[in-house]
């Protein structure tokens, strides 16, 4: 459970289960979500998500405490920890609250605490918790510890997760973190390393959270400062100048966030620990290939102007669908995709967006895709704006 480290009682392990994730089922002839909002007359520049009623803790099933934890990368170099700490604190922003994901031995935790920050450590491996407790006591108690995994907060699929987790709502309420309107400042900064496995699934899950203003983004424009595989970093930042890396994921992240590369670091600067805090070695070919790459420390700051009258947390699923469909045939012309995506006059849309008929998908910048989507959404001469397959379920992929 979460408690200030300076006054920790005998440690207990609690867990809570979040509700089912939000799935979108789109069918031919479905009513438009934008029309449902028309009567409200509310823009989303000052959107502040409404929190759901509190959920209590529940007992974890017997298998939870016995599960094997996956291997994780940790910062174990004091030099690297000092570099990251300096990067995170150099801007002297008002936000001094850091949520650290799986700090492990706490090398970066110590660097942040010594710089005067308040740190909330979400640690999934209980082996490291006693050391983190001691660290918090020795450095003035500005450290809160929670036994859970940040990357498994508020799962979007049905069922339970391993290790024990809490909902972001319950976590933030207990820590006294208040929601901020989307147009205001940053409520907190997340720092850590993407999990060794499922980087791509994690990126998609976070995208859904941002666009739907769910999970941690119910509290405002939470900033992410994370180490990520260099290849995935290149994909996130790709544009028409890097057509071989450019994809729907690139567009969605660049539309949603300002992305800044802060630092590159060789894989050798990180240690891998398995369960029980033991040093581990990569076993599969994929991991061996990753070792030869750098990890990139990137900052993902949600844009104040992400939401507009025509792109909202209600209809974002359609924007996702449009991009996935476009990049399935990435070398096709935009006008050909428009014919299969929407009954709206394709040539009229091209004219409004100032695009030529020869324009290809890979010639479109992220801002162009957003303008395209909003242009179709605000078309007044058509009751139905989008064409779907008979059955399409939008899941985190």
Image (cartoon, rainbow, N blue to C red):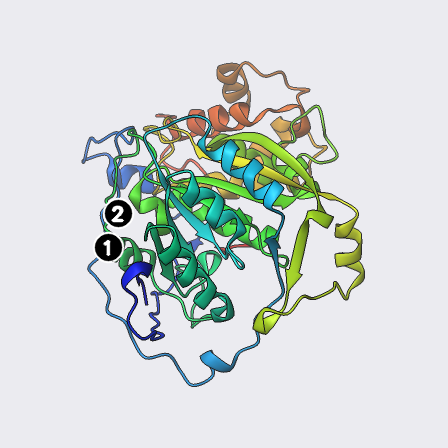
Label 1: how many Cα within 10 Å (few below 14, some 14–19, many 20+) = few
Q: Which mark is residue 173?
A: 1
Reading the image, the residue beneath label 2 is 177
The residue at the point 43 percent across, 72 percent down is 160
Q: Quadrant of the C terminus?
A: bottom right
Q: Describe residue 323's horizontal placement relative to residue 47 as left or right.
A: right
Q: Describe residue 136's horizontal placement relative to residue 351 as left or right.
A: left
Q: Describe residue 262's horizontal placement relative to residue 310 as left or right.
A: right
Say if 202 sits above or below 14 in the image: above
Q: Quadrant of residue 366?
A: top right
Q: Which mark is residue 310?
A: none
User: Spatial distance from mark 1 to mark 2, Cα to Cα?
Assistant: 6 Å
Judging depth in this view, the residue of 40 and 3 nearest the camera is: 3
Q: Quadrant of the N terminus?
A: bottom left
Where disc 1 sits, the SS reads: helix
Residue 279, percent from left and from top = 67, 66
Q: Describe residue 278's horizontal placement relative to residue 186 as left or right.
A: right
């Amino acid at each position: 459970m979460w408690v200030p480290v300076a006054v920790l009682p005998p440690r207990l392990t609690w867990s809570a289960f979040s509700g089912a994730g939000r799935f979108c089922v789109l069918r031919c002839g479905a009513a438009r979500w934008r029309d449902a909002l028309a009567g409200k007359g509310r823009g989303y520049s000052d959107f502040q998500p409404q929190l759901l009623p509190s959920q209590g803790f529940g007992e974890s099933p017997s298998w939870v405490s016995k599960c094997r934890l996956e291997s994780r990368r940790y910062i174990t170099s004091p030099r690297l920890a000092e570099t990251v700490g300096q990067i995170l604190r150099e801007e002297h922003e008002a936000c001094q609250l850091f949520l650290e994901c799986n700090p492990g031995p706490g090398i970066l935790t110590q660097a942040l605490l010594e710089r005067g920050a308040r740190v909330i450590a979400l640690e999934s491996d209980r082996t490291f918790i006693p050391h983190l407790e001691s660290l918090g006591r020795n450095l003035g108690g500005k450290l809160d510890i929670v036994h859970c995994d940040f990357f498994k907060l508020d799962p979007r699929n049905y069922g339970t997760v391993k290790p024990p987790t809490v909902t972001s709502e319950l976590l933030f309420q207990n820590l006294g973190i208040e929601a901020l309107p989307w147009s205001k400042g940053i409520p907190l900064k997340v720092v850590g390393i993407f999990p060794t496995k499922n980087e791509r699934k994690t990126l998609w899950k976070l995208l859904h959270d941002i666009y739907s203003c769910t999970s941690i983004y119910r509290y405002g424009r939470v900033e992410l400062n994370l180490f990520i595989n260099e290849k995935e970093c290149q994909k996130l930042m790709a544009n028409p100048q890097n057509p071989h890396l450019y994809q729907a994921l690139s567009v969605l992240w660049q539309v949603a966030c300002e992305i800044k590369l802060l630092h590159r670091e060789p894989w050798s600067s990180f240690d891998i620990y398995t369960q029980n805090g033991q040093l581990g070695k990569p076993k599969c070919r994929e991991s061996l290939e990753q070792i030869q790459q750098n990890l990139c420390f990137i900052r993902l700051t949600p844009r104040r102007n992400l939401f507009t009258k025509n792109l909202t947390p209600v209809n974002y699923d359609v924007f996702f669908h449009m991009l996935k469909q476009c990049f399935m045939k990435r070398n096709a012309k935009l006008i050909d995709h428009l014919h299969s995506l929407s009954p709206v006059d394709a040539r009229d849309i091209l004219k409004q967006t100032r695009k030529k008929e020869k324009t290809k998908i890979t010639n479109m910048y992220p801002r162009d895709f957003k303008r395209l989507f909003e242009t179709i959404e605000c078309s007044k001469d058509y009751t139905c704006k989008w064409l779907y397959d008979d059955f399409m379920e939008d899941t985190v992929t």
